[in-house]
Image (spheres, rainbow, N blue to C red):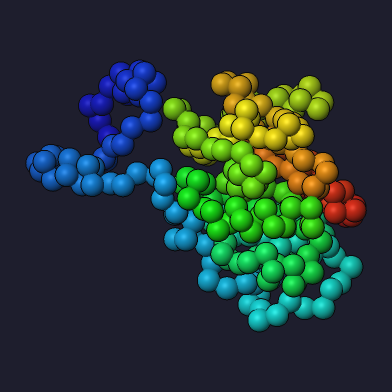
Amino acid sequence: MEGVDTRALTRHIRTRGAMRGVVATDVDHIDNLMDRLKGYPGLVDRDIVQDVTGDAAYLWHENRKIPMDTPPAKSDRPRVMVVDCGVKLNILRMLDRHGCEVVVVPARTSSRHIMAMDPDGVLLSNGPGDPAPLRYLVDTVRDLLGRVPIFGICLGHQILGQALGGSTAKLRFGHHGVNQPVKNLRTGRVEISSQNHGFVVLTETLPRDTRVTHVNLNDNTLEGLSFPGLKAFSVQYHPEAAPGPRDSAYLFREYLQLMGRHTPHGA
């Protein structure tokens, strides 16, 4: 691109909030581009997860997808069911590296089917769009609470928040980038995190027993929560960042501890 006053554009968006836009090489048909822009439905109240989730369950091991009809017999590796909402591959790599047996299932997999696979833990993955219309997934997670340790990442954090009784909303300014400062309220340490989301769990809507564990230092929005009595916790950002900062990779070790397991040496 050229001839664009990017600083003026930044100031405009900073004042007005995130806006729809078109990037095009055809500047001779502005009316057509405007019609396409007006016809874009946006993200609010749309289930985009259905477009990115998988069609069938599979095992993930050593960077390979292994199709499966039924899960193999349990081994000494903790079995983690990853609910695929558009999962980043490095989440699967991190679980595998930490000694987990990784089983990935589609987003619409029922709690009954998940529990039938005898999991040691469930991970709710990242994914695109608005979490509010994903009632089927919220209901599944609500049914799993207290039955199996749960770890939510990004969209998975928002799903867990709703399953606990909280509400979500669209951010005026989304969080995007690999330099978002997050404060760990348990340790007082500041972590640099990778983030890419436009929605947030509203802290004031969560049950009183919910522990706020992390907050964003730019706008003080919720970045992490835990509910120890139900063995569930989540973060809004990406501890598996690849590329990105590794400040929060310890969360995978905490997840293994929640399952009563230990991280293999060198993971």
Residue drawn at 63 percent across, 66 percent down: 110
Q: Judge left or right: residue 242 versus residue 128.
A: right
In the figure, 246 relative to 113: above or below? above
Q: Is residue 97 above or below residue 4?
A: below
Residue 233 can be seen in this image: yes
Q: Residue at x 59, y 26 (%)?
A: 221
Residue 80 occupies quadrant: bottom right
Residue at 31% x, 36% y is 20
Q: Residue at x 35, y 44 (%)?
A: 42
Relative placement, left or right, of 103 versus 78 is left
Give percent across and percent down for residue 141: 66, 55
In the displayed structure, would residue 34 be above or below residue 109?
Answer: above
> Looking at the rendering, in which quadrant would you find the N terminus?
top left
Residue 153 visible in this rendered orientation of the protein? no
Count of marks overlaid on the render: 0
Q: Return the residue nearer the eye: 119 or 34.
A: 119
Give the x, y percent position of residue 13. 35, 24
Q: Nearer the viewer, residue 107 or 75?
A: 107
x then y, percent, for residue 249 = 74, 42
Displayed quadrant of residue 220: top right
